[in-house]
Amino acid sequence: MRKTDFYDIHIEHQAKMVDYAGYTMPIQYKNGIIHEHKVVREKVGIFDVSHMGEFKIVGPQALDLIQKITINDAAKLQKWDAQYSAMCYHDGGIVDDLLIYHMGNDGYLLVVNGANVEKDYAWVMENAEGMDVEVMNQTDEIHLLAVQGPKSLETLQGLTTIDISVIPFYKFREGMMLDEYMLVSRTGYTGELGFELYFRNNKETAERIFNSILKAGAKYGIEPIGLGARDTLRLEKGFPLYGNDIDHTTNPIEAGLSWITKASKGEFNGKEAILKIMDEKPKRRLVGFVVDTEKFIARNGYKVFADGKEIGHVTSGNQSPSLGVPIGMAYVETEYKNPGTQIEIERKGKFFPATIKKMPLL
């Protein structure tokens, strides 16, 4: 397993390390997932997410390639814009969800999920064949930190020459922070005010930046946060996780991603299949739910029942530190998707009651 340049810092802060996306990453630190979750919701936390993948796309047909491989309309992007999107196969199944950054004359930066870097890069290169475009996998060159929480702005503003207070949601700027040139993006996977910091250079620089942010945020209660809290934070906000809630067997319409599916933009991979699904209506939908009994966590793959029949399966589930109850997401037959619908989740022959809720759950 690979290590990010922040590995020694994770060990210093007593992180429990796990194998994730080809890297050894912190799942939690000494105070645990629930504590870390609340730190981000109430104060500020810093995440090492350097396992994520970055592809730079340049050339006369850079936009043409992005329009072909993604379902959102990248033609609307101006310099300094970020966009949430997804790539689909020709049958409408999801290759990955991703972020697109419009870098002006420097082209575009695509940020993909860490577990999918090799697969995604191969897919992009396959689609780029014959086009006047250059695709560069810069994953190994870029460090990525996420500083998230209500106090993230106060923590970072004194460290940079960029006025980050005026960066709108899903916009970014480039400039100096802690004497290093960075892309500072007003994005994140927590649902809180937050920023994602992209920068290059060596391990020494990476450690200096991480520790300097910790020092600057100390008066606001900053702590390093692991992947465990990252999962509970995103689940409360209904953000899908590739490999659980979306994958090659799911399409954007049933996954609740119609809002980023721009079928009128022109041709793109999976358009014909997606239009057919839109016309015929999806047979299932991704929904959120709250478990109506204590001490039961619905895990990926558990079967969902209603009216005495199996209607779907759980994709994600965990205890919600903010709500104090178990929550989750599941695919269910479309007729059962409405909030308030009573369902049961089966585990080893036992059935546990739950209620479908509108997402986000928090």
Image: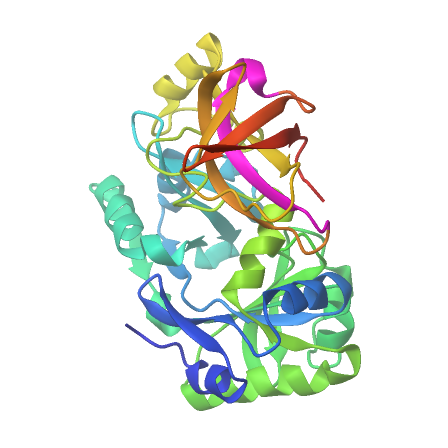
**Residue 361 lies in the magenta stretch:** no
Reply above or below: 155 against 178. Answer: above
Q: Position of residue 256 (x, y in %)?
A: 54, 30
Q: Residue at x 60, y 34 (%)?
A: 288
Q: Residue at x 40, y 60 (%)?
A: 54
Task: Answer with left or right where residue 163 lies relative to residue 104.
Answer: right
Q: Residue at x 59, y 87 (%)?
A: 211
Of residues 94 and 269, the one drawn nearer to the viewer in this rendering: 94
Of residues 128 and 50, the one drawn nearer to the viewer in this rendering: 50
User: On the rendered image, what quadrant is the C terminus found in?
Assistant: top right
**Outermost residue, top direction?**
280
Q: Position of residue 152 (x, y in %)?
A: 72, 69
User: On the rendered image, what quadrant is the N terminus found in?
Assistant: bottom left
Q: Does residue 304 appear in the picture of this structure?
A: yes
Reply above or below: 319 against 129. Answer: below
Reply above or below: 52 against 98. Answer: below
Task: Answer with left or right where residue 79 lies relative to residue 241.
Answer: right
Q: Residue at x 35, y 19 (%)?
A: 273
Q: Position of residue 328 (x, y in %)?
A: 57, 41
Of residues 3 and 30, the one drawn nearer to the viewer in this rendering: 30
**Residue 326 lies in the magenta stretch:** yes
Q: Does residue 189 appear in the picture of this structure?
A: no
> So how many labels did they put on this image?
0
Q: Position of residue 40 (x, y in %)?
A: 69, 65
Please say which color scheme the image uses: rainbow
Q: Which residues are drawn in magenta?
A: 323-337
